[in-house]
């Protein structure tokens, strides 16, 4: 992959065992770079960036509780953690997008505050954000130089110099990219090259990459890694964030693990194995697991057969039976929500089939899905689940007009008694039924979405992240409600969740998706946090290890 | 150059060039349509290319092309200015009325007054939109009525009549060289300068960036509020200028001057290739859009079609332009989604 130079793996043998816990051991910190340098020929100087005890809250949500990161010149530093561990918030602090509530930032030996993206750039930090920050209508050159274009007489933009400078940079990266073409339609890989070119043109000493490989093909990943190596050997500090642990092992020298907004440890990778990272990422006690329910599992309600949507997911096959709760686990962006959307018909499918009670559904028709008895509680309840500016009772009756119609009109009295009935059944806490949905708390809004679908007696209920942003008490209530629906009413439930304790508690079966494919399936007793994380991050040797794991076979080529 | 071994190289290859070409064609397409339209009309009715007719078309297009310059700045940043018609009306009356009020007032001062009125209106629009973060569409819908209301209350039942205007002022629209009015040439120069500025100055490019991806604009630290504010101020000032020119063309100014112009201007801008959701298009394209609309109106007349059909044709053109843009965007997204997938080994 790399042409010459020191491959990170070289250090492994001589460096084995030098692992230390960073917290509370400052002396070891001072020894370590020298040791690393000696062992691998790396030129690791004093830290170029240190962030200590950074905190950041958004309202009641503590996104960052104790954010620490230390970068040294000439290193690629991995940053790993589960969804919601605070990685992206930390990145945005470094980018100057979020201002931390407290904490200390030292760049090149100087303590400072970053009061905006421009300040961050000015001290030599280049951030490649997760959501590509591309201007599709501007040229590649303009994208790279936006806000700091070279100027000529009369403060006019000097397009010639701009294009020439990029040509040089692109050449140095060994790729072809026409600076004059507009960015619209560039592949994700090319967009990243553009961002890297931006970092180079800034002469950045620190480059932060937030999940740069998430949507790249294997070949493109190799190419990216070559560039990262190139930058590293030139003395740049690269902070590399990835959910794919093997990538971290491939190109990083040190790794920082975060969990629940806090720093867990920073260690050299030599001497660590993937399992160490998974343990550190999960880290918490497994709690709140009821015994595998004594539910009566009935007939197949939902059959998904080789479902594909090009570029999003492929060859996804699974069943959900009556009375069963099946959880789709996996990382954000692994294609779970997209599969749910395709089943319900919001997105069209390119291939494969969806059957409800043996009857095939048309592609791209939510109307058809609803008629067949499918309910869908989307991820974003405020935007997609409810009509916020509409009364509570009308939101409840929204999907049940068929039952509420008499002689072609919807009868107000019928609608109100229907809504009152469901509101009391779900113990909805509201002021007035005629008040807007926006007057309810987050948890009650979620119950409202559920009430809307339960009013139709669905045979399949798809719930996408049903408890995100909901307080603990209501969350438990939603859990019990879903369990009761399955156990007592025989509803088939397909649930998407990113929260591992929830996955473990709720799933009669857990399916794990990674990069648009179904990669593992665990029964309630087989499922464990470690196994799910391992399958979701591609550490399959761990996932398929010791006990029976039927990897869902249909899809794998 | 001779390493076709990577996926990265592929994406910059020939299919990509095709996509680029389609977008460039969209910009020049308007000129092609214009030429074809003139050719067909002239074929049927040769008198269409008569000198008097050309002058009429150009004068008619001049006002709209000028307004389209300001509107382009606003639309490119994903906003809209619906108040231009009202601003034009207010400026036309107040500035031309100065000739009757202040004896012997120099014409440049009258122009400055008109621009000043537009500037004030633009500052109000821009401040509410950019700093109070109210969608500009709604803000300018409100000021469309408010400014018209102010205009009506100032004008009352009266009007400015052509005889009260100095001869030099009225001649602005009639003096011409080889059949092309002076004022049209001046406006063409202004539009060319505007197009160049939008392209060549940071502030201009940042308007495109804001319209292209507002979130990314924030991430790279573009002063979004300041840029959007400036765009509205420029649009207002230009509408003020257009008001004075309008008064010199028509001579008679009452409180209905410029009513409904805002929709024609937005139509011209979109037909001229400026994306309705911002990010792309040029002021020159928008000017050609205005010229096309003006040509069609006159051509229908020359062909003996009832002028009542004119709005229907404008609407048809608008639908075609937007459908075309949307079609290209959707098709492109689809192609790109599938292409990314095929890179998987």
Image: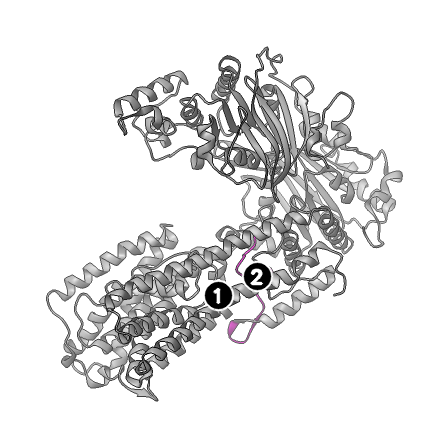
Marks 2,1: beta carbons within 8 A: no
Q: Residue at x 66, y 56 (%)?
A: A193
Q: Residue at x 31, y 87 (%)?
A: B176
* Magenta run includes residue B56: no
User: Which residue lies most toward the left here?
Assistant: B157
From which residue to which does the magenta span run?
Answer: A133-155
Question: SS of the residue at dot 2?
Answer: helix
Question: SS of the residue at dot 1?
Answer: helix
Where in the figure is residue A160, as x and y percent of width and height? 61, 72
Where in the figure is residue A270, as x and y percent of width and height? 82, 38
B294 vs A374: above or below: below
Where in the figure is residue B309, as x and y percent of width and height? 27, 65
Q: Which residue is mark 2?
A: B19
Q: Quadrant of residue B2?
A: bottom right
Along the line of sight, the residue nearer the viewer: B303 or A149: B303
Q: Is residue B220 visible?
A: no
Q: Which mark is residue B26?
A: 1
Quarter in which the C terminus of chain A is drawn = top right
Q: Is residue A383 visible?
A: yes
Chain of the residue under the numbered disc 2 shown in the image: B
User: Which residue lies most toward the top here?
Assistant: A294
């Amino acid at each position: 992959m790399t042409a010459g130079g020191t491959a990170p793996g070289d250090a492994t043998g001589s460096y084995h065992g030098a692992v230390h816990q960073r917290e509370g051991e400052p002396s070891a910190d001072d020894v370590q770079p020298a040791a690393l340098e000696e062992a691998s020929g790396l030129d690791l100087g004093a830290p170029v960036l240190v962030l200590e005890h950074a905190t950041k809250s958004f309202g009641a949500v503590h996104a960052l509780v104790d954010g620490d990161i230390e970068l040294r010149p000439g290193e690629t530093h991995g940053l790993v953690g589960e969804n919601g561990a605070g990685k992206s918030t930390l990145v945005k602090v470094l980018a100057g997008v979020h201002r931390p509530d407290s904490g200390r930032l030292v760049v090149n030996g100087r303590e400072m505050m970053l009061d905006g993206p421009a300040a961050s750039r000015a001290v030599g930090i280049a951030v490649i954000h997760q959501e590509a920050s591309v201007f599709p209508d501007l040229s590649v050159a303009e994208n790279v130089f936006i806000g700091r274009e070279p100027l000529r007489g009369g403060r006019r933009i000097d397009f010639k110099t701009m294009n020439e400078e990029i040509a040089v940079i692109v050449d140095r990266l060994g790729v072809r990219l026409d600076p004059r073409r507009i960015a619209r339609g560039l592949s994700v890989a090319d967009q990243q090259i553009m961002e890297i070119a931006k970092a180079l043109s800034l002469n950045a000493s620190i480059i932060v990459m937030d999940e740069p490989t998430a949507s790249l093909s294997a070949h493109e990943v190799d190419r990216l890694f070559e560039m990262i190596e190139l930058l590293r050997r030139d003395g740049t500090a690269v902070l590399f964030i990835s959910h794919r642990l093997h990538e971290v092992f491939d190109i990083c020298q040190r790794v920082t693990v975060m969990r629940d907004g806090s720093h867990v440890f920073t260690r050299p990778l030599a001497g660590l194995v993937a399992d160490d990272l998974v343990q550190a990422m999960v880290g918490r006690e497994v709690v709140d697991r009821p015994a595998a329910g004594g539910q009566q599992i009935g007939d197949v309600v939902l059959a998904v057969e080789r479902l594909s949507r090009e570029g999003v997911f492929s060859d996804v096959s699974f069943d959900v039976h009556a009375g069963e709760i099946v959880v789709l686990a996996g990382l954000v962006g692994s294609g779970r929500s997209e599969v749910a959307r395709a089943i319900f018909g919001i997105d069209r499918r390119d291939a494969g089939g969806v059957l409800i009670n043996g009857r095939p559904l048309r592609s791209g028709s939510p109307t058809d899905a609803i008629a067949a008895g499918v309910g869908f509680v989307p991820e974003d309840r405020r935007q997609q689940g409810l009509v916020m500016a509409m009364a509570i009772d009308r939101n409840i009756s929204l999907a049940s007009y068929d039952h509420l119609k008499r002689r072609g009109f919807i009868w107000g009295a019928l609608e109100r008694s229907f809504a009152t009935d469901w509101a009391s059944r779900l113990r909805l806490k509201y002021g007035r039924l005629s008040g807007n949905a926006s007057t309810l708390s987050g948890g009650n809004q979620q119950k409202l979405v559920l009430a809307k679908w339960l009013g139709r007696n669905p045979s399949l209920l798809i719930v996408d992240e049903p408890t995100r942003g909901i307080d603990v008490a209501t969350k438990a209530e939603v859990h019990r409600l879903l369990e009761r629906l399955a156990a007592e009413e025989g509803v088939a439930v397909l649930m998407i969740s990113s929260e591992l304790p929830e996955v473990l508690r709720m799933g009669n079966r857990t399916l794990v998706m990674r990069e648009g494919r179904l990669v593992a399936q665990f029964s309630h007793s087989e499922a464990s946090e470690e196994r799910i994380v391992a399958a979701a991050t591609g550490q399959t040797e761990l996932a398929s290890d010791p006990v029976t794991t039927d990897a869902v076979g249909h899809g794998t080529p | 150059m001779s390493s076709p071994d990577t996926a990265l190289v592929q994406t910059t290859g020939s299919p990509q060039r095709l996509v680029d070409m389609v977008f460039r064609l969209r910009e020049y397409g308007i000129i092609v349509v214009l030429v074809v339209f003139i050719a067909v009309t002239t074929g049927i009715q040769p008198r269409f290319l008569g000198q008097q007719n050309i002058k009429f078309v150009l004068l008619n297009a001049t006002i709209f092309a000028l307004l389209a310059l300001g509107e382009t700045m606003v639309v490119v940043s994903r906003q809209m200015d619906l108040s231009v018609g009202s601003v034009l009306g207010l400026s036309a009356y107040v500035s031309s009325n100065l000739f009757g009020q202040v004896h012997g007032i120099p014409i440049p001062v009258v122009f400055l007054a008109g621009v000043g009125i537009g500037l004030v209106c633009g500052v109000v629009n821009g401040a509410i939109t950019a700093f109070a973060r109210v969608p500009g569409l709604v803000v300018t819908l409100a000021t469309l009525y408010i400014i018209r209301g102010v205009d009506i209350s100032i004008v009352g039942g009266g009007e400015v009549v052509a005889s009260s205007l100095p001869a030099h002022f009225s001649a602005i629209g009639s003096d011409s060289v080889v059949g092309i009015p002076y004022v049209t040439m001046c406006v063409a120069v202004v539009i060319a300068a505007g197009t160049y500025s939008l392209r060549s100055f940071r502030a201009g490019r940042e308007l495109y960036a804001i319209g292209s991806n507002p979130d990314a604009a924030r991430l790279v630290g573009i002063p979004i509020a300041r840029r959007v504010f400036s765009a509205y101020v420029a649009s207002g000032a230009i509408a003020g200028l257009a008001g004075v020119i309008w008064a010199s063309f028509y001579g008679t100014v009452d409180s209905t001057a410029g009513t409904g112009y805002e929709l024609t201007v937005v139509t011209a801008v979109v037909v001229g290739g400026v994306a309705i959701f911002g990010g792309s298009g040029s002021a020159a394209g928008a000017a050609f859009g205005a010229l096309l609309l003006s040509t069609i109106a006159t051509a229908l007349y020359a062909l003996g079609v009832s002028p009542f059909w004119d709005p229907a044709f404008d609407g048809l053109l608008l639908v075609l332009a937007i459908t075309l843009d949307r079609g290209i965007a959707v098709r492109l997204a689809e192609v790109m989604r599938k292409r990314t997938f095929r890179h998987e080994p």
